[in-house]
Amino acid sequence: MSASYAVVGGGISGLVAAYRLRGAAGPDATITVFDPADRLGGVLRTERIGGQPLDVGAEAFIARRPEVPALLAELGLAGRQIGTTGARPLIYSQRRLHPLPTDTLQGIPAQPQALAGLVDDATIGRMLDERARPFSWRPGADPSVADLVGDRFGEQVVTRSVDPLLAGVYAGSAATIGLRSAAPTLAAALDRGAGNLTDAVREALPAPLSGSVFGAVEGGYTVLVDELVRRAGIRWAQVAVGQVDRAQRGWELVDDEGERWLTDAAVLAVPAPQLSSLVEGVAPRTAAAARRIPVASTALVALALPGGTPLPEQSGVLVASGERLHAKAITLSSRKWGQRGNVELVRLSFGRLGDSAETNAARSAGDEDLLSWASQDLAAVFGVNVEPVDCHVHRWIDAMPQYGPGHPDLVAGNLGLNYSYTSSRRSRFGVYAADFTGHRATDIVLTQEINGTEYPVWGLAQLGQPIYPLAIRFPSYAAFSEASIPQMFGASQLQQAIHFQTDTLASVYLQNTGDGTFTLSSLPNLAQISPIKGIAVDDVDGDGNLDLIVAGNLYEAEPNTPRADAGNGLWLRGDGHGHFTPVPAVESGFLAPLDVTGLALIKTPTGKAVLVANNGDSLQAFAIRRR
């Protein structure tokens, strides 16, 4: 029997995954791509505008990076790779067009004079003396681009030089995007010890290379998409997948029409909003992480203007923050990639993260509105008032992930170190969750590892009743007492179960190192005397460092497990370096000794307050008063 594979998502990531699967699994494997769109390719989409192919999604790749050129060569499409004409973009700021500054990294200048004419003399002066001002940087830090650049170089650099690029590329802004996402090489230079932002930018700037910075595919990305589909030999199921579950052998996918698909393995190549709902049942932590990724929606208007329309010999226009235009970017495609046919191809992009429901162009504006805005913006920027010979409007909903500042440190509440359950690296505590009886309900089995083998925490009296096959298989307590988890359930049942193990039950602080990993440290012992079920983060004492307010307890527990009620709530004063010091209740005034179910930080007319929700009891409120 040949293997079967599922790829959920028919964008470029899903299609490349299917192509790689075909190479690894061989010609006999069945590969099904699930995507409800009217065509495959995701945000790679080519339309014919004015009789010419034009990409109305992503239009370019970074030519100096090897991945796309290597893929094109592998597919026999190297001859279809094209570069730009060399035309450079402009910035629209203060109702005027300015040349895009050179020697910048995502608009962050290495030389102050690069922004002469775009920002005022006071800002140039601020950049010139930046190296002389004190500078502090914590390796692994990830501020927003706006916070760092605005503090060191001034607000005009952010709004007039940085924001236009980040809005054009990410549909975000310097205030919503983290430095490590927007400029990872700059963050790395700061981590290595650059003494100021100016030196860090100069160190991070890539060496100049000959040739085009950007590349594209002659005939549009449809050429690449079609070749990937052909080479992958896929079956296309034009439905959406709504749920992924474990099956007895492999995985089961449930589509939006209720049909169930069995597959040996599945690749999920979908945007974050779709991923969270897909994997909630099998990978809740992944689902939670996906939900934390905000997304932006954009709309694109493609126009074919009459040949000879007087447009500048530039590749396009990036729009500074606060300008009275609707578009965030204009691409003069015929100038950027070369003339094709007797038309001038132009793209206008609308929408960015933070747009309200009323101003969100992709979601709320009609096609006629977008076309009208496009005409108004072309008139305002270029003085062009002509009727297009052809047009196309396309919307990309939730298509632009936003990786915000912080990639934040995390604080994780746990049972603590004063609970009846224990865990260590040599004797890990674990849990299995599955339908072990076939009665369509989830059974929970807690485990303790002894010499590398897992055994049940609960005895036969507790497990034998809900999971009745155990009482049949082990008729005596003596027989049950010697059985391990694999002996009780067997490999096939355990393979279907959700299984987690931990080597600590401590509540912890996870410091983001900035390279995709975390450094774990336990919270102080006073925070470990009871489970933590609520956490609020705020600079309570106004010293510039974030503090923690925690509370918990756990009144309802399993039979033979005493309730946890030793906690009184706690303020943990932070020092800004990942260390926290308990503040006694007599000093803090914070006392939450009940069965706490959660904390919430709210704003009041007199300041901030912490609300404490108590199971079966009254809500508590504590005002935060800075001395």
Image: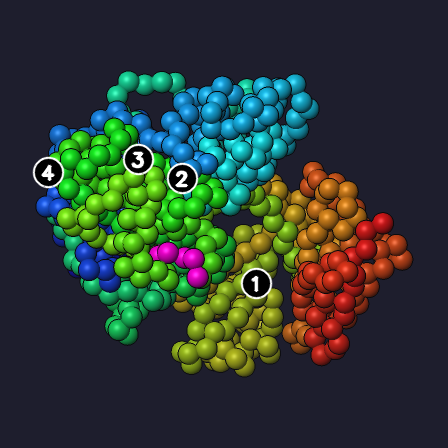
Element marked by disc 2: strand
Q: Toward which corner of the image does residue 597 lie, by quadrant?
A: bottom right
Q: Report the residue marked by disc 4.
A: 342
* Residue 396 left/right relative to 391: right
Element marked by disc 3: strand
* Residue 190 left/right relative to 266: right
Residue 267 in the image: state x and y as whole percent. 31, 53
Residue 441 in the image: state x and y as whole percent. 46, 77
Residue 553, placed above or below residue 3:
below
Nearest the viewer among 196 and 537 is: 196
Residue at 54 percent of width and 27 percent of height: 120
C-alpha distance separating marks 1 and 3: 62 Å
Q: Give the residue at the far right of this rendering.
A: 586
Q: Residue 319 carries which label?
A: 2
Q: Residue 447 carries which label?
A: 1
Asked if the residue under mark 4 is in contact with the one under mark 1, i.e. CB atoms within 8 Å, the reply is: no
Asked if the residue under mark 1 is in contact with the one under mark 2, i.e. CB atoms within 8 Å, the reply is: no
Q: What residue type is labelled 3?
A: Gly
Which comes before the other along the chain, label 4 or label 2? 2
Callout 2: few (<14), some (14-19), or many (20+) C-alpha neighbours within 10 Å?
many
